Amino acid sequence: MFHAEITGWGKCLPPAVLSNEDLATFLDTSDEWITSRTGIKERRICHCNFSDMALVAARRALAAADLDPSELDLILLGSLTNDSLCPNTASLIQDALGARNCASIDINSACTGFLYGLHIGTNLIRTGAHKKVLVIGGEFISHYMNWNRRDVAVLFGDACGAVIIEASEKETGLIASKIGCEADAKYAIQITNLGSAYSRQSDDFLYVGWNFEGQEVFRRAVKCMSLACKDVLKQAGLTVDDIKLVVPHQANKRILDSLARRVGIDPDRVFVNVHKYGNTSAGTIPVALTEAVEEGRISPGDYILTASFGAGLTWGAGLIRWGDRVTPLKESDAELPPNDKTALEILEPQIRRYAAREESVT
Ligand code: UT7
């Protein structure tokens, strides 16, 4: 049986920064509330298309693995904010990369999209069906935001990350994983007015709405991620003492602290960057993994625990054994198109549109 070694990693953060103070200029909120309830100080706002971010992250991951795109045999893209539904966005990435020898699949499982992709890609490599897989996770969630909703708008940001996994005979990569979905809570996070169920029924079509039961999601997130973490540790015959670093989904610092307590791991061994980027949905884990490697927090052979949850309510955990290399083989010069706007300037038309909409319905 093959294993699926992580040989490349990359991230893409759009440059425009939206601070808590910026949000307080048009929402009834404050830096104090956002920081104390979530740990988030700022987030990034995308000025281009989602696929531009995904492409930069993918090019950086390919360079780190020193892989030519023509060697890829599968692209798995976890996101719910794709450029378009048809064609799928993985095919846009495939074409832009010139990865002519592969299949391309979009995975819509919200924040768990990257972990689901890593689970699927790893298991396809294990069977021998695929050998070199690009797994991308990211989100352009600001595009789908309802800027009247202070309880949701302050939580999210835009970003993308990617890894390359390659067949290997060494026991490395995702050595154990568990994914699931608490579908009875599917409406605890719901983006309304988008999708074929809405288009014929609603005058509100395209005025995106959110159902968001924050406390219910919080409770289930901690429960599902901690149970999944224990499951993968058991599968691998390891304990928390064997884990060098936990690299979990970054939604809320309080969720990370509760997860650390439940799993019985010191908070110092939990990687945190939610203060810089907010919740970037499927982007959080590949961005955090990339930063953990860049910051020297992962060494060859380390065991890394990861866990995620998101709309669905999808959830999962994975146990990664890092390979022999923590330095990229090559660097990519891929960059996003230039941007000369502030985050508030980028968002201004959307904020104005949602404010006008609220006025017209009240
Ligand atoms: O990847 C999955 C994505 N989902 C999540 O990660 C969500 C998980 N849940 C959470 O992170 C937390 O539940 C939240 C951060 C969303 C909310 O924190 P909370 O401590 O559960 O606050 P709450 O919902 O109980 O709201 C407390 C108060 C309410 O006011 P009242 O009713 O007590 O007067 C809210 O209206 O805070 C108010 N509030 C705000 N105040 C200032 C809600 N949002 C804001 C805001 N600024 N942005």
Image (spheres, rainbow, N blue to C red):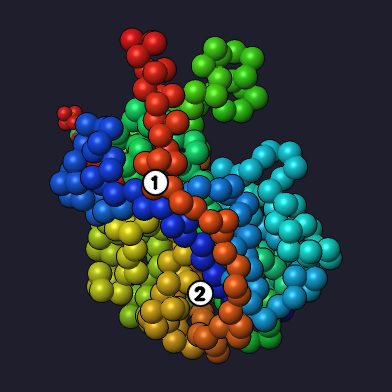
Question: Which of 206 and 2 lies nearest the eye of the viewer?
Answer: 206
Q: Is residue 233 left or right of residue 255?
A: right
**Residue corresponding to mark 1:** 343
**Is residue 10 positioned above or below 67 on the image?**
above
Secondary element under disc 2, as helix, strand or loop, is strand
**Residue corresponding to mark 2:** 320
Q: Is residue 5 left or right of residue 308?
A: right
- The residue at the point 60 percent across, 73 percent down is 333
Image coordinates for residue 18, horizontal then vertical, percent: 34, 48
Quadrant in the picture for the N terminus: bottom right
Ligand 1 occupies quarter = top left
Question: Which of 339 and 334 lies nearest the eye of the viewer?
Answer: 339
Image coordinates for residue 61, horizontal then vertical, percent: 60, 72
Q: Nearer the viewer, mark 2 or mark 1?
A: 1
Image coordinates for residue 149, horizontal then vertical, percent: 34, 30
**Is residue 329 positioned above or below 134 on the image?**
below
Q: CA distance from mark 2 to mark 1?
A: 35 Å
- The residue at the point 44 percent across, 24 percent down is 353
- The residue at the point 67 percent across, 58 percent down is 76
Cβ at disc 1 under 8 Å from ligand 1: no
